[in-house]
Image (spheres, rainbow, N blue to C red):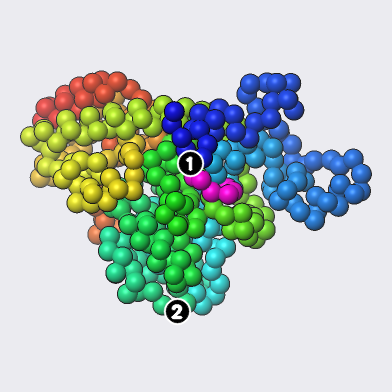
């Protein structure tokens, strides 16, 4: 049977955190749709104020429905505790803000998720916190830019467009030696295929909008770490900025997480099959997928991840933006959209970011196309790609 750390994966997804005797033995937990909680006497009311983390006082802090989700996500990442947020972006912002003060410095891997980039490049500087971006594929390069005031290292491994990877055990060790807080955006691999806390990473961040929910109907996020770190974030950013996840959305993510293992294994297999088809196609210059042997960091990818999910990119042989657009417009089964991790296959062509007035030097070439393969039959997706590629 498949174990997740000390617990059975099936146990976490199906039972952990659920106390059915408290709600009529209902199989699905109720949505405890309440803002506040009443107390039977002054002593219990006072006790809740003294330790809000351990009590249900007000839903901006704790709520029983979000509590079930927190326990499952913490167990999946093998951390003591987790907090859930109204978005992944809120989770990342709170993780960073909780660990810096004016005068501090953060290091961030280059070209991270766009709003992580904005946080480091635009927002932190308003509060006297400086940031440096680093390529991330060479730990020695990270060591070189560490300053005495460096407090946080923000990683995203793999990146969700280039799939660039950082050596997580090396980065974890480095940060522990230097007293730097390490944060990893683990959204790409999901907790099923990579667990950064096992490599000494302090805070594991997820967007639950992608694989954890898996149905493209909720925006949510999570942070996983030690009880002390989660306490610290709870009593500062979590309670003051108020990014709590609504109980109804938490319940939808609990519903989605039941099938995490099924979905991840399916999209991983489909993604590789579709990637191999593209690799052999004469109109494709290169496929960028961390589990294909020609990926530059293939060995490291295999070492620290046990799978990849359904996201990868490819470079189309094309001499103009229009040629790329024609191919993408010819796809019938891939929806054209941002995001990923749901049931539906998606395509994101980087040609749309070119020639935008006021935005010079797009980061990625116009012939880069990102695909997400969902839960459909792989041959259904391959047939669609074949007809679109063969059209020109
Ligand atoms: C989507 C995404 C986020 C942000 O999550 P939201 O839930 O949309 O706020 C962060 N990191 C990665 C890698 C993502 O793909």
- Position of the C terminus, as image quadrant, is top left
Kindly report the secondary structure that dominates the magenta region of the rendered protein: loop
Is residue 264 shown left or right of residue 219? left
Residue placed under numbered mark 2 in the picture? 148
- Of helix, strand and loop, which one carries label 2? loop
Looking at the image, how many numbered discs can be counted on the residues?
Answer: 2
Residue under the point 49% across and 64% down: 181
Q: Is residue 317 above or below residue 230?
A: above
Given residues 360 and 346, the one toward you in this image is: 346
Q: Is residue 89 above or below residue 190?
A: below
Q: Do we see residue 332 in this rendering?
A: no
Distance between the Cα atoms at labels 1 and 2?
Answer: 35 Å
User: Which percent across, then down, holds residue 164?
Assistant: 28, 52
The numbered mark, 1 or 2, whose residue comes first in the sequence reads 1
Q: Is residue 143 above or below residue 90?
A: below
Discs 1/2, front: 1
Is residue 291 shown left or right of residue 22? left
User: Which percent across, then down, holds residue 211?
Assistant: 43, 36
Q: Residues within 10 Å of mark 2 (few under 14, many from 20)?
A: few
- Position of the N terminus, as image quadrant, is top left
Q: Magenta residues, as a range?
A: 77-82
Q: Do we see residue 97 in this rendering?
A: yes
- Of helix, strand and loop, which one carries label 1? loop
Is 247 contained in the magenta span? no
Residue placed under numbered mark 1 in the picture? 5
Is 80 contained in the magenta span? yes
Is residue 379 shown left or right of residue 172? left
Q: Which mark is residue 274?
A: none
């Amino acid at each position: 049977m498949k174990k997740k750390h000390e617990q059975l994966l099936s146990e976490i997804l199906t039972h952990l955190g659920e106390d059915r005797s408290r709600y009529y033995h209902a199989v699905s937990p109720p949505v405890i749709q309440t803002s506040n909680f009443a107390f039977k006497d002054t002593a219990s009311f006072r006790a809740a104020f003294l330790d809000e983390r351990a009590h249900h006082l007000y839903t901006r802090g704790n709520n029983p429905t979000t509590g079930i989700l927190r326990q499952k996500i913490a167990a999946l990442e093998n951390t003591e505790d987790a907090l859930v947020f109204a978005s992944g972006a809120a989770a990342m912002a709170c993780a960073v803000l909780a660990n810096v003060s004016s005068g501090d410095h953060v290091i961030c891997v280059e070209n991270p998720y766009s709003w992580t980039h904005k946080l480091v490049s635009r927002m932190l500087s308003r509060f006297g916190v400086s940031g440096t971006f680093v390529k991330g594929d060479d730990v020695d390069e990270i060591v070189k830019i560490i300053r005495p005031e460096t407090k946080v290292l923000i990683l995203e491994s793999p990146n969700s467009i280039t799939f660039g990877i950082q050596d997580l055990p090396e980065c974890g060790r480095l940060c522990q030696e230097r007293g730097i807080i390490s944060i990893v955006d683990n959204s790409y691999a999901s907790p099923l295929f990579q667990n950064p806390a096992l490599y000494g990473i302090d805070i594991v961040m997820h967007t639950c909008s992608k694989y954890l929910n898996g149905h493209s109907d909720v925006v949510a996020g999570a942070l996983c770490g030690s009880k002390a770190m989660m306490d610290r974030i709870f009593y500062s950013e979590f309670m003051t900025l108020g990014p709590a996840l609504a109980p109804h959305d938490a319940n939808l993510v609990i519903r989605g997480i039941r099938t995490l293992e099924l979905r991840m294994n399916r999209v991983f297999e489909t993604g590789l099959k579709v990637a191999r088809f593209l690799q052999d196609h004469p109109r494709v210059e290169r496929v960028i997928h961390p589990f294909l042997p020609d990926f530059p960091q293939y060995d490291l990818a295999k070492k620290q991840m046990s799978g990849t999910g359904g996201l990868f990119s490819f470079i189309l042989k094309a001499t103009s933006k229009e040629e790329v657009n024609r191919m993408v417009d010819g796809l019938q089964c891939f929806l054209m959209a941002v995001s990923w991790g749901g049931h539906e296959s998606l395509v994101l062509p980087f040609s749309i970011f070119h020639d935008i007035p006021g935005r010079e030097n797009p980061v990625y070439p116009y012939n880069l196309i990102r695909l997400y393969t969902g839960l459909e039959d792989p041959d259904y997706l391959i047939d669609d790609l074949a007809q679109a590629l063969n059209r020109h």
